């Protein structure tokens, strides 16, 4: 385990997250990035990616680094993460061997491993990224794990700062559940909630009954928010009035975790939760991490409207990835 | 939509295509390429590729650029292209969101999306690359769409110029249908026909009854050829006498488009159309875009013979891709 | 065929292998690598890879080169290798066309193609890499073929030199068979045996009855070892006493080659061959090329023990790949 791991972003503290977002906005404005020629980021993707992979590869280039991308199970060996496993099944390589090997070839290891949505206690342990940390000596960067998506939250924070100014305390963010044809992991809503709370925003989480988040994460966020001068509130109707920022996202409920058919029936009955342009407060910015199911999660009118920040946030994924690599590579203060 | 899009190559005009091919021959001869350090080409491949992907990646390197390659449905999200779609099925990301996001990370977007060969009116709309253009502000480069393959045609034109000289008007090109175990898209024969017509060649298209090309494309090519001092003729026997250039390629017929079983029976009865060495006029150059089904489309004796230009054309994919990127990146005149 | 092909490593001779390993240790120690800016390695992977692909890509970067990676059958066309084939089945591209095309785009071609384990005479011909050599003019580097894995052996030799000193003649190496849930190719044991013999080590191959290696390879190694002052001995019990180096690896037996069910029953009865920490002589180094099936091939206690060299060898894959590219690119003496 390395002190520069980026797992949920709180490693940097509120001031560190804000400083990273500020640095990203400066880089976007033309500031020269630090350069790490001859250095490498090695990314291990157990799930697909468009923005995360491309922005990280572009960020590496902008810093003079090279990016190697592996897909275990496809171009690389299927990996085992359980310590002590008798490897008699289909996984070919143990992370105990693969992670130290990759560290011989690169300076930063990054990994994406979504929740399996079968066993909530298993997912709660965030098993893959935890194994990467267990076997690594160099920094590990989370490219979305079962629980967290810190690189997304850095771009979110930079978007908030770009529109709301540097002091985010007390600013009103509504995170609303949205329909989706499939049960989805909770890493993004967990992370939005955690980061908004960390920087002291006034957060409302709106979701239907049964589509609850992990209560321990809600409690953790509430504590962080209270410390920072903000708050966390959970409601079960989709009233977005008063919000300055609306974050739409679908997720599968904690209560019904892993009960696929039951959960699918519940979701099918909740199509009224689609985020439509008419539900948005007049001046609220609309955010979604993307990819978004258009006209299911959010309608075209909202996504293509004048207050949609989705493309801007996607763009900030590049500049925040650069700022994150600057910090991880150790040339900038880790926290503000 | 961007004025520097490269969709079928006619955007450059006849003089522009010839200038690009000439530039490629100069680059092959040792001319120094322009340099675009810190710039990126992002390529989205919905189908496999050997030459297109490798030559583009090598071209980018030679110009100091970086290439990012994505495969939606495999390493990236499956994409929807229909405007207004209710995304309740298997596509995860709409191009309305994915294309603008990728444009935040790169300077040129390139995309490969073959015809599906199910609905000819749908393929005629070239739906994927059309959607990329609809949602893009930066240049889009076609890496082979349902209808066109312009990068191949630039290498074809450079090959013609290398062997026949700079003035291609009236030079005799025969494009012949060839057998294949599978029904194939028409992008390559469409493009050979269009580009040869554009530069004023005297084109004969030879195909069996039923293996016709889209008549609107044949008409368009005939008009272009007439304007440039050439001509287009369609014949139904494989007499290649008099041709200076023979282009072999299999394609599925426009008349029987999408009728797979019927089309397969027709093809099976047409094995006599294999292009063999003895069918080639003594001094004609043999071309094929590759990959080629050896001893089905073209026999070994022809492909390995002294007048086979296939490897040379493949090599020119590198130098024409460089010349194309130079033009698209805006540092050279777009047309001659 | 090119005089700088690296197929089984013996092209360099014993002195060349030792010089390459020595150079790798110097590079690891901080020596500046040669630089080949603007040059390219194109790698064709027909099978998965973690270390080989990543170390080669990192090595290319360290030498100022670019690496292009293709996966025929996935992102590139499925390839045919048989000369004269009538390509009426599922392979889309013949190596006779694909290899020369790739050579137009790169300076070194590298290829991975494992044994199919169906027909031992077919695998013995090493058909894919042989076809690459047949159609290539530039150097071909073997990234593990049906028979050989030379890049692994360079890292093995560098590991031996790091621990045993520069003169390996007479040093005692035991190569032991180990259990595995699947039948595996013999490229790695073949290569360990060949390279250890080439540099004059005293090699013991320990395997159960029926898990024999190709006798022609054992004979070839014995001849090489005798010339170099070493020896080769085959035993059928797993007594590792006296070994200074223990190499563990599973492989499928030559006698039962391709008889999958029979071979699976035999393997299942041989779990006592798991290499455990208590079987290792006190000062012997433990090697495995990785990936390793933990607690099936080798137990955790051995792999995580103080004499495990597996991560060090994996790390030397980078430095030996650099030394190999230096030699192949022609700027260093090919042999010592």
Image (cartoon, coloured by chain):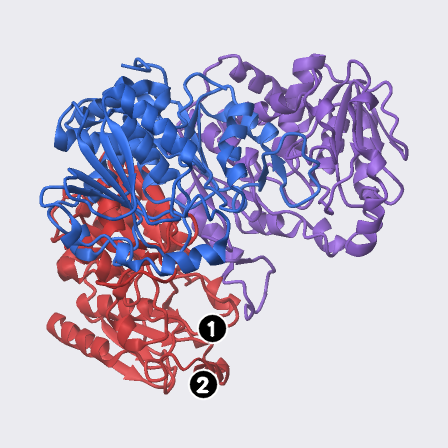
Chain colours: A red, B purple, C blue
Note whether residue C114 is visible: yes
Query: In the rendered view, does A79 fall on the left or right side of A304?
Result: left
Give the chain letter at badge 1.
Answer: A
Residue toward you, B274 or C130: C130
User: What SS does tag 1 mark?
Assistant: loop
Note whether residue B322 is visible: no
Query: In the rendered view, does B121 fall on the left or right side of C257?
Result: right
Q: Name the residue that disc number 2 marks.
A: A262
Residue A132 percent coordinates (x, y): 23, 56
Q: Name the residue that disc number 1 marks.
A: A182
User: What SS does tag 2 mark?
Assistant: helix
Q: Are marks 1 and 2 in contact (CB under 8 Å)?
A: no
Which residue is pictured at 25% across the width and 37% down the height? C204
Residue A336 percent coordinates (x, y): 11, 53
On the same chain, marks 1 and 2? The answer is yes
- Closer to the N terminus: mark 1 or mark 2? 1
The C terminus of chain C lies in quadrant: top left
- CA gap, disc 1 to disc 2? 12 Å
Whether C99 is drawn above or below A183: the answer is: above
Q: Quadrant of residue B91?
A: bottom right
Which residue is pictured at 33% across the width and 71% down the height? A186
Give the crowd class for mark 1: few <14, some 14-19, many >=20 residues within 10 Å.
some
Query: In the rendered view, does A12 fall on the left or right side of C323?
Result: left
């Amino acid at each position: 385990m390395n002190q520069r791991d980026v797992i949920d972003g709180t490693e940097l503290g509120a001031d560190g997250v804000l400083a990273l977002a500020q640095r990203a906005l400066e880089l976007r404005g033309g500031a020269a990035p630090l350069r790490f020629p001859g250095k490498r980021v090695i990314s291990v993707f157990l799930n697909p990616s468009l923005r995360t992979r491309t922005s990280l590869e572009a960020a590496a280039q902008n810093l003079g680094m090279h990016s190697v991308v592996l897909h275990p199970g496809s171009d690389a060996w299927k990996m085992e993460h359980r310590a002590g496993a008798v490897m008699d099944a289909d996984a070919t390589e143990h992370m105990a061997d693969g992670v130290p090997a990759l560290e011989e070839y690169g300076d930063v290891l990054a990994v994406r491993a979504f929740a399996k949505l079968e066993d909530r206690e298993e997912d709660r342990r965030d098993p893959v990224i935890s194994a990467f940390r267990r076997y690594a000596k160099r920094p590990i960067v989370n490219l979305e794990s079962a629980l967290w998506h810190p690189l997304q939250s850095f771009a979110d924070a930079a978007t908030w700062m770009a529109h709301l100014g540097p002091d985010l305390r007390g600013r009103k963010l509504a995170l609303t559940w949205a329909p989706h044809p499939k049960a989805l992991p909770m890493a993004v809503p967990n992370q939005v909630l955690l980061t908004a709370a960390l920087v002291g925003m006034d957060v409302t989480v709106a979701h239907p009954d049964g589509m609850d988040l992990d209560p321990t994460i809600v409690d953790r966020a509430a504590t962080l928010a209270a410390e920072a001068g903000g708050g966390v509130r959970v409601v079960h109707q989709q009233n977005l009035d008063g919000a300055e920022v609306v974050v739409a996202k679908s997720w599968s409920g904690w209560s019904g975790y892993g009960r696929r058919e039951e959960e699918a029936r519940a979701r099918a009955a909740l199509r009224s939760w689609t985020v439509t342009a008419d539900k948005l407060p007049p001046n609220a910015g609309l955010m979604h991490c993307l990819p978004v199911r258009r006209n299911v999660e959010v309608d075209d009118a909202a996504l293509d409207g004048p207050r949609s920040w989705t493309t801007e946030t996607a763009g900030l994924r590049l500049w925040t990835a650069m700022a994150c690599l600057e910090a991880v590579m150790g040339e900038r203060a880790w926290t503000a």
